[in-house]
Image (cartoon, helix red, strand yellow):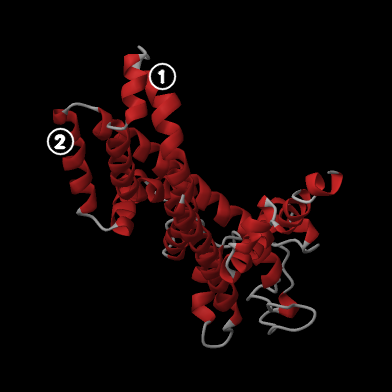
Amino acid sequence: MSGSAGAPLLPLAASTAHQPSGARRALAHLHVAEVIAGLILLFLLVAALAPQLLTATDPLAIAPASAFTPPSPGHPFGTDESGRDIFTRVVYGARSSLLIGVAATGIGLVLALVLGSLAGLGPRAVDFGVNRLLEVLFAFPGLLLALLFITIFGVGVTTSTIAVGLATAPGYARIIRSQIRSIRGSGFIEAAVVLGRSPGQIFRRSILPNVAAGLFALATLGVGQAIVWASALSFLGLGAVPPAAEWGAMLSAGRTYISVAWWLTFFPGLFVVLAAASATVLGRGLQRRNRER
């Protein structure tokens, strides 16, 4: 009796032992590109939060005798026209570049959430008005809209950050509007209305949590785009300006010497591409997982 009663436990235990844990299943679904992108962003995060762990040199310290030193063991990324170490400046530039990208993305998403919620939850007249406004904003290319804002309000890091955020908001707003309108007709929303919950409670408890996952994926994609646009504005002299340790400003300063010192523009440009591509890869991965759920 004991043998027959215990027999079914063996296959059950064996099958349980061979079942992968949640963490293992999550790792198994990670693509190689996503792992590489995560490592790159981890390095940039360390550079932004604790650059002294990666370099002990002052990014603004000049050494005229070492000007235009090509990449070498002493200066892995070479030096610029004032003898400043490019590796140190790239590391310290991660803080300002990532901060601008994250802040601009946050501004764009907050504005998009307001506009998308008004269009998705408001009456037909409000939806019509918001859609017409978005169409007008869409008539301007994103970078041109940012340039128009800077022309009106002046040049600077803060202005360029707000300008990039405003330029990205229309696209996010349309996505949020479509998500909210699809959720608004769901059964759990009707149940919340029947239970007598206020519109504010329904938005906070039922609508916003369902939109949040998509917003996180949008934010990850948006950071990469914002870094590229902010670097482009700095390259044009409309954001951070030399000798600031910011990737776009470094590109702007190095373009004068591109024929004799290629490393001045190559390494800052490389990190702009790496940051944008890594954020995009992770954002696409998050979007794919949201669709699979």
Q: Which of marks 1 and 2 is nearer the N terminus?
A: 2
**Image point (33%, 58%), residue name:** 143
**Real-space CA distance between mark 1 and mark 2, rounded to the nearest whole angstrom:** 25 Å
Image disc number at residue 201:
1
Looking at the rendering, in which quadrant would you find the N terminus? top right
Location of residue 89 (image quadrant) = bottom right
Residue type highlighted by circle 2:
Phe
Up-down relation of residue 220 to residue 173 (above or below): below
Q: In this view, does 96 lie to the left or right of 196?
A: right
**Image point (56%, 73%), residue name:** 270
The furthest residue to the bottom: 260
Up-down relation of residue 195 to residue 33 (above or below): above
Q: Is residue 38 left or right of residue 150?
A: right
Residue 103 percent across, percent down from the top left = 50, 45
Q: Is disc 2 surrounded by few (<14), some (14 to 19) or many (20+) residues within 10 Å?
A: few
Residue 201 percent across, percent down from the top left = 41, 19
Residue type highlighted by circle 1:
Gln
Q: Label 2: which residue? A: 128
Image disc number at residue 53:
none
Circle 2: element type: helix
In the image, which is nearer the foreground, mark 1 or mark 2? 1
Q: In this view, does 98 lie to the left or right of 229?
A: right
Location of residue 63 (image quadrant) = bottom right
**Image point (75%, 84%), residue name:** 72
Q: Is disc 1 surrounded by few (<14), some (14 to 19) or many (20+) residues within 10 Å?
A: few
Q: How many marks?
A: 2
Residue nearer the viewer, 15 or 4 = 4
